[in-house]
Amino acid sequence: MNISDYLIDQAGHDWAAMLSDWAWLLPEDLTVWMVNRFGDIIFVPDDGSVQLLDIGAGVVTPLADSRETFCTLIDTGDNADYWLLISLTNECVAAGLTLAPGQCYSFRIAPVLGGKYEAGNIEVVDLAVNYGLLAQIHQQIKDLPDGTRVNLVLDE
């Protein structure tokens, strides 16, 4: 496996601007380390730990206490598949979904709204727009109990 086949090239992106709508969930200072093809961010805050921003679920998950530990853990069990969405990325590629620079895969219906983790629920979208859209959705529903009916209002 070549890990770069499952990551987005970070060059040329203004990560501070693209993640600004996620400020309510992310630490103030962080280093973007890796970005999977779904736009999930593996980042390192000031404490040196490694964490995952899952933009589909709208959660931050601690992965490891250091980059070194992360490099060991990614080869353990299904971690690489889970953190990088390897199987789902392979399904997207097999379905003919290709990414251009500045694009990512996104769920037509976000998992947090009942969307399934399958190629039929995935489309290619602009990376920056996807961050803004999903951040708005998650911020609006973050305090609601599971199963609550929602009416979403998205800012331009």
Image (cartoon, grey):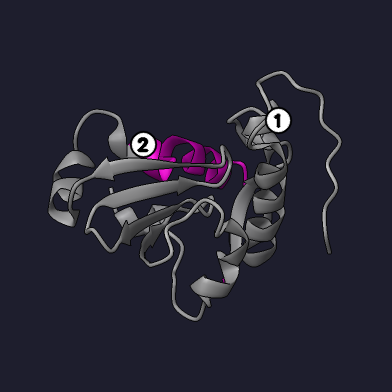
Quick one: label 2 or label 1, which is nearer the N terminus? 2
Identify the residue shown where x is 28% and y is 47%. 1
Label 1 sits on residue: 113
Q: Amino acid at mark 2?
A: Asp
Identify the residue shown where x is 56% and y is 42%. 58
- Say whether residue 155 is left or right of residue 121: right
Q: Quadrant of the C terminus?
A: bottom right
- Badge 1: residue crowd in 10 Å (few <14, some 14–19, many ≥20): some
Q: Amino acid at mark 1?
A: Leu
- Say whether residue 66 is left or right of residue 40: left
74 shown above or below 10: above
| Image x and y of residue 40, in percent | 48, 51
Callout 1: helix, strand or loop? helix
Proximity of marks 2 and 1: CB atoms separated by less than 8 Å: no
Identify the residue shown where x is 55% and y is 64%. 19
- Can you tell which quarter of the image residue 41 is in? bottom left
Dot label at residue 81: 2
| Image x and y of residue 55, in percent | 55, 47
Q: Rounded to the nearest whole Å, what is the CA distance between mark 2 and mark 1?
A: 22 Å
| Image x and y of residue 90, in percent | 47, 41
Question: What are the residue bounds of the magenta stretch?
Answer: 81-101
Identify the residue shown where x is 32% and y is 60%. 45
Q: Residue furthest top?
A: 147
| Image x and y of residue 117, in percent | 58, 30
Tell which of 14 and 8 is nearer to you. Answer: 14
